[in-house]
Image: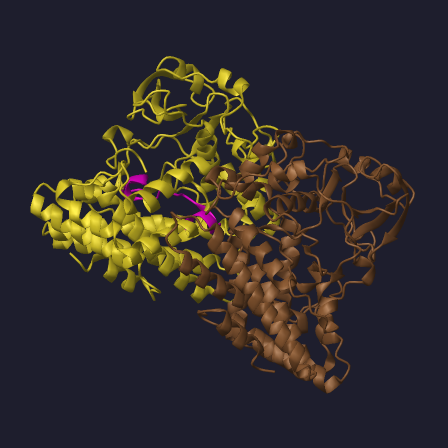
Chain colours: A yellow, B brown
Amino acid sequence: MRPSGARPDTDTWCAAGRRPATRRSKRSPEGSCPISSAAAADPGASAGTARLTLEACPPILLPMAVEPIPSATGLGSSLPPASARERYEPLDSRSVVEFVRPVLPAAWRAEEIGDGNLNLIFRVFDEHDRTVIVKQALPYLRIVGDSWPLTLERARIEGDALALQDRLAPGLVPRLLGYDADRKAIVMEDLRSFEVWRTELNAQRAYPRAAADVGRFCGQMFMRTSNLLCPPEEWKGLLARSVNPELCAITEDLVFTAPYVDAPSNDVEAHLTAEAEALRNDRELVEAAAALRHQFRTRAEAFIHGDLHTGSVMVSTSGTRMIDPEFAFMGPMGFDSGAVLGNLAMAFIAHWAQGHEPFAATVARDARAFWDALAGSIAELWPADEPWRDRFIANLVTDSAHYAGAKMIRRIVGLAHVSDITGIGDPSVRRRAQAAVLRGGRALVCAPEIADLAGLWKLAVEAV
Amino acid sequence: MRPSGARPDTDTWCAAGRRPATRRSKRSPEGSCPISSAAAADPGASAGTARLTLEACPPILLPMAVEPIPSATGLGSSLPPASARERYEPLDSRSVVEFVRPVLPAAWRAEEIGDGNLNLIFRVFDEHDRTVIVKQALPYLRIVGDSWPLTLERARIEGDALALQDRLAPGLVPRLLGYDADRKAIVMEDLRSFEVWRTELNAQRAYPRAAADVGRFCGQMFMRTSNLLCPPEEWKGLLARSVNPELCAITEDLVFTAPYVDAPSNDVEAHLTAEAEALRNDRELVEAAAALRHQFRTRAEAFIHGDLHTGSVMVSTSGTRMIDPEFAFMGPMGFDSGAVLGNLAMAFIAHWAQGHEPFAATVARDARAFWDALAGSIAELWPADEPWRDRFIANLVTDSAHYAGAKMIRRIVGLAHVSDITGIGDPSVRRRAQAAVLRGGRALVCAPEIADLAGLWKLAVEAV
């Protein structure tokens, strides 16, 4: 989904500060409607504040009058109105220091980090070396300039998503410290002591708790934003509020469309030309991918992350954080769990092809730990009056398999590749891994029904 | 969905007036995005007018500022704000005459028709005996009084739905003449020369074009409001605009929940007590129904009617109209096609059980004509760049079978019954028909995959 699959090292952040205990103690009990309870437990949160203030987490569902959803009007351009654009101005490493004072009173200097292509990212320090991160949406893709306009709406989406995730899966996302609607900037916990999971997997460094944390994150978000737990009225409000057309269109194009046509955006290594063409002529696969695109568009099952590959997971020995939820929307649960499993399958294939059998086995155990934690969270939260849990899990395995396959294929013949594979120096080993990913992906996308994780994993990796 | 399955005869309306040719000629060409093209072709339509004016069809997607979606805020009550409630006042047969003058200048008298339980319905005459229908939402269920409050929001939903259906499936719904947001009243074409299809089927009167018209209506609405034809941004706007929590909750309860538990709302004839209990103890069926409820809630495939039984279809020798779309929302297509087929299956079973084999054969031909017209419309509108039409049709058959089965079961052991069955005078014949409907419904709900309409129909009716 990002121009480059490899996340720059400057994108790794450190933890700063802890949530006050009083906040956590107000959280709603297990089992009651998570969304409405969270709002009810913190009445102040529903008063939308356009300016950044201390502890000013945005409400999950801002009143329409404060922040209308431009895309929900259906009336042409989804750009914010001119008045909002006029108030917008890019931050720089001086102005951002003033900007964060409400949440970091002793702030005194800032560094711009990140590649700054879609967003400006700053790390701001205070006099005691405590830090926060400021992420400001850019109104265009910087490498192309203002000829490629982007809506600033995604900053609100990311802020809303972080706030919702922090309430429903606490401790598994960076803490949101504030959101400024005018400047389209969010302020959040710095993750400086964390590393990108993909980088660590590539370096054969194991993080024993990471996979289970990702599974718990998925299970908690899936269940707590599903209408299995939420009253229909609340749930439909979340559905309406969470449409995310611009970024969903990117996914639809890059994951489900471009790899199956000869799209100019595809980046195919020369030695894979024949494989890529065979794939485009594989009628069963092309049909299955198109049907899957329709499912991605129409199955509003839960508030999903929307881009949950191993580069969106920050790991440390003490905890795990899912980052960058700007693709979040009400979509199929299997798209998130499939992203995790598809990316772990690629890590497995890469290590196996390179002769790193012991670490490949670690990755396979990660896949199992992820799935067990996911299924465990679902079982824990499953409502007693829904008599179809086994069927639900079975459907989720099959959906995860399909989406995992689509994610694997697009990382070989689509626009954005993954460093697990591109980082393999020996061309013949790399080619073997690429072919195995394509075959595994094809088997998954075309699979009819899959009984359990073992069946999914076998299809995904058996070609290496 | 309605308190009584039998629609009173006073609910049958007659056609008055024709659409000016200039309006029709502006319609968008086949193949382009139907929703945005319709809006673009008629720029005036996007200026929301709260007062009733001649030709004042509401825009499909009113700007949020004019008519916010209360349910989309997610902030508690979905009742309109106090100011709107204060402007609301019920019409009577005197005030309604003044009310319709903008569209019927020579109006002089009105009759209240309909049972007036959920809505007030008036027929207004002018001096030349031309008529229009006014339907005003009541803020509570009249038989219970204001202890059962209902949102007036459904008048907007019905007005929006009629406007959208009239643009995308012209001539197959009553023409919408106006909508008054303050009074929660819509003004529409009178269908006085039409009859309720269910009544005509019961009386063994055939309407050769009706079934195919219903099929064309479904096919056109399914395709033109799907994201197969609409750009994602437009489609997501329609999704956000069309959430309909209150009436969806009624369907979820009455169709998918109550029949499978010992709900007080269920109305089970004494001789069916054992069958109803066996059904509640049928674990496979109960699980399948719960999974189907989840699909109904989460599969936002197209703007569906939401209550398309044979009592929602008005027939005449010259045309067919689908009425009462207050349950409309973005849901699974198979729920509409399943409703039609499930209700035709009950008509078939009722006639077959009563020895009316020739008319039963007519009903079976209606089911075939419905499906062929539906599949034909889909084929006609199917976009060339979606390579999975056969798979789409196969999925639609299976989904239709599941929903048809749920609709059949709930009409025997749920709250609302159908006159096809309740009208069978001989108790032993009625009981045989009821048992056949339950067995057919069970077979459909539990069916894995169904290849074609013949397979669906066989499961539905073979028990009689």
- Tell me, yes or no, whether the highlighted magenta stretch contains residue A376: no
Q: In which quadrant of the rendered view does residue A253 lie?
A: top left
Q: Is residue B446 visible?
A: no
Judging depth in this view, the residue of B98 and A212 nearest the camera is B98
- Residue A418 image position (x, y, % from top left): 23, 41
Q: How many labels does the image show?
A: 0
Q: In which quadrant of the rendered view does residue A155 lie?
A: top left
| Quadrant of the drawing holding the N terminus of chain B | bottom right
Judging depth in this view, the residue of B34 and B330 nearest the camera is B34
The structure residue drawn at horizontal position 48% and vertical position 35%, both measured from the top left corner, is A160
| Quadrant of the drawing holding the C terminus of chain B | bottom right
Judging depth in this view, the residue of B365 and B283 nearest the camera is B365
The structure residue drawn at horizontal position 31% and vertical position 31%, both measured from the top left corner, is A14
Farthest residue to the top: give it: A94
Q: In this view, does B298 lie above or below A384?
A: above
Q: Is residue B247 above or below residue A305?
A: below
Tell me if B324 is positioned left or right of A185 in this view. right
Q: Give the range drawn in magenta.
A: A296-319
Farthest residue to the bottom: give it: B428
Q: Can residue B7 be seen in this view?
A: yes
- Residue B329 image position (x, y, % from top left): 60, 50
- Tell me, yes or no, whether the highlighted magenta stretch contains residue A311: yes
- Residue B53 image position (x, y, % from top left): 77, 33
The structure residue drawn at horizontal position 17% and vertical position 44%, both measured from the top left corner, is A421
Tell me if A19 is positioned left or right of B318 in this view. left
Q: In which quadrant of the rendered view does residue A15 lie?
A: top left
- Residue A385 image position (x, y, % from top left): 56, 64
Judging depth in this view, the residue of A288 and A463 nearest the camera is A288
